[in-house]
Amino acid sequence: MAKKKKNFKETTIENFYDLRVDKIDELVAALKDDSYEPQGDISMNISDCTGIDDPKNVTRSGKQKQFDPYKTDFLGRIPTWIKAIFVKWWFAGVVCYFVMWGLSGLDALDQMVLLGAVLGLIVDVLVNPLFRYMETDRKEYNDYMMFPFPFKAFWTFFTNILYYVLVVTCVMFIYAGITNLVIHINGSASVWTGVEPLLFGVYTVVVDMIFIGIKDGIVRLVKKRGKKEIAANV
C-alpha cells in the first residue's frame, strides 16, 4: 500500500510575520509630511525591533540587548593589511608543510616547480576568493593580489601557477644566498639553512608583495599617463 502523504498546514503571512500596522502608518505619514515627528522614543531593543521575545536577547544583568545596525565584528576591526598578510603567510606555510616536507624524496628542482604550482593553485582557488568574500565595495584587497580579476576569469588559474613558480624560485635563491652567507661567516661547508613552513611563509610573502608592489606601481603610472593624455586632448 502506498503511504499517505502528510498534509502540512500552510502558514499565512499574518501568522508568520508580526506585522506592525501602526509603524507602517507612521512611516507613510513621515514620507508625506516632513514636519511629522514619531510619537514616543524609538526603541533599540532587539525584542522590540524584531517582535520576538528571545532569551538570547537578554544580557546576564537582565537588560535587553541593544540593536546596532552599524556594529562591526571582531574581524572587521582588524586592518586589511594584517588580514591579507596573515592569510598569504599561513597558506604558504601550509603548502610548504604538505608539499616540501611530504614529498622530500623528490629532486630539488621538481620540488620547487611542484611547490610553486600547488601554491598558485591554492591562491587561485582559495586565497583570492577569500579576499573577494571579505572585501567591501572599495576593493581594498586588490593591492594584495597579483591578478585582481573575478574568480570566473579562468585564465588566472594558469597565470597564478606560473607566477608562483617564479615566486618560489626567488625564495629558493634567498635560501641559497643565506646558506652561502652563513658558510662564509662560519667558514664551514657543513652549515646550511633548512626549509621550514614558518620562514618559508615569510620569504614567500616578502617576494610576493615586492612583485605585486612593482605591478601596482606600473599600473598607477599607466593610469596617470592615460589621464594626462585625455586631459591634454580635451
Image (spheres, rainbow, N blue to C red):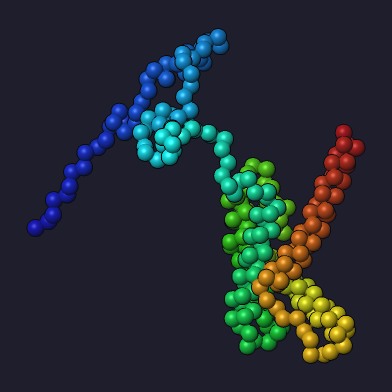
The x, y position of residue 227, in whole percent, is 84, 41
- 192 and 166: which is toward the camera: 192
Lateral position of residue 109 relative to residue 135, left or right: right
Point 63% across, 45% down: residue: 77
The x, y position of residue 138, in whole percent, is 68, 43
Vertical position of residue 125 compared to residue 117: above or below:
above
Point 48% across, 21% down: residue: 42
* Residue at the extreme left of the image, as rendered: 1
The x, y position of residue 203, in whole percent, is 74, 69
- 97 and 148: which is toward the camera: 97
Vertical position of residue 195 compared to residue 18: above or below:
below
- 120 and 229: which is toward the camera: 120
Residue 174 visible (yes or no): yes
The x, y position of residue 110, in whole percent, is 68, 83
Lateral position of residue 181 relative to residue 160, left or right: right
Point 82% across, 90% down: residue: 189
